[in-house]
Amino acid sequence: MKPLLELKNVEAWYGESHVLHGVNMHVAEGEMICILGRNGMGKTTTLRTIMGNLRKRTGEITFAGKDLITTPLHRVAHTGIGYVPEERGIFATLSVEENLMLPPVVAGGGMPLREIYDLFPNLEERRNSPGTKLSGGEQQMLAMARILRTGARCILLDEPTEGLAPVIIQRIGEVLVQLKKRGMTVVLVEQNFRFAAQVADRFYLMDHGQMTAEFPVSELAAQMGMLNRELGV
Ligand SMILES: Nc1ncnc2c1ncn2[C@@H]1O[C@H](COP(=O)(O)OP(=O)(O)OP(=O)(O)O)[C@@H](O)[C@H]1O
């Protein structure tokens, strides 16, 4: 079966700085993959390159049969792919509900507000609170919810657990399991290896702008020695 998202030999640059050196990656529909790697290896850049935020890029990126390299930046979300950046991008002066309603529904199947509140009950409780008053966990959930409303069927999540308390991390894990049950495709970048090990189906290890290893969760135990050497997990 053809992957939903596929990168072939993708290279990308920030100005003169060559950061991705031939990234190969594929994600099946409904799969949750996790990109592991030390700081600065190109994980965030991979997500930004898929979304078209880095325009200087070569190789092939296809999503749902569409060529994303030639898709204009403002049309990428219309293909059904959404990005939740590490900094979350919540509008501080707007309420939770205004943050949710602001981005347009750009692809078919956008999650209605009612379903979003069922998935994130604490967002409903806080629907009138301004972005500035939200905890880190609430901000992360709002950032994810906002992307689900746009109609994305594949979400790219950059370090969703960063800086969050264990109980909130567990809640985010539960949401990801729910999304997976609904058939959502997820690309996760995570430093929190213990969290990723509980939710991901398959792993990529990124090193100096390339994927240097790939294995399914069933091989995790056998790969621990290698991961320990590479990441110190
Ligand atoms: N806006 C930018 N301009 C120039 N270089 C950048 C920019 N953003 C990142 N880089 C460089 O690109 C390389 C890859 O960074 P990237 O953020 O993709 O790594 P990462 O694996 O996501 O690590 P981290 O977890 O630290 O974010 C690093 O050398 C970084 O310094």
Image (tube, rainbow, N blue to C red):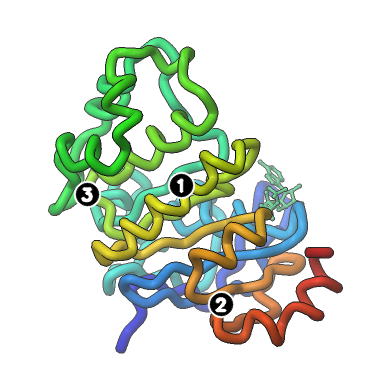
Residue shown at the point (18%, 50%) measured from the top left: 107
Upstream in sequence: badge 2 or badge 1:
2
Q: Amino acid at mark 3?
A: Gly
Q: Amino acid at mark 1?
A: Ile
Q: Is residue 169 left or right of residue 93?
A: right
What's the distance in space between the residues labelled 2 and 1, CA to CA?
Answer: 28 Å
What's the distance in space between the residues labelled 3 and 2, CA to CA?
Answer: 26 Å
Q: Amino acid at mark 2?
A: Asn
Upstream in sequence: badge 3 or badge 2:
2
Residue that carries the numbered disc 2 in the rendered image: 24
| Mark 3 neighbour density, 10 Å: few (under 14) some (14–19) many (20 or more) | many
Residue 119, given in percent of the width and then of the height, sits at 28, 43
Q: Secondary structure at mark 1?
A: helix
Q: Secondary structure at mark 3?
A: loop
User: Which is more foreground, mark 1 or mark 3?
Assistant: 1
Residue shown at the point (65%, 36%) measured from the top left: 163
Residue that carries the numbered disc 1 in the rendered image: 172
Residue 151, given in percent of the width and then of the height, sits at 22, 49
Residue that carries the numbered disc 3 in the rendered image: 151
The foreground one among 167 and 223 is 167
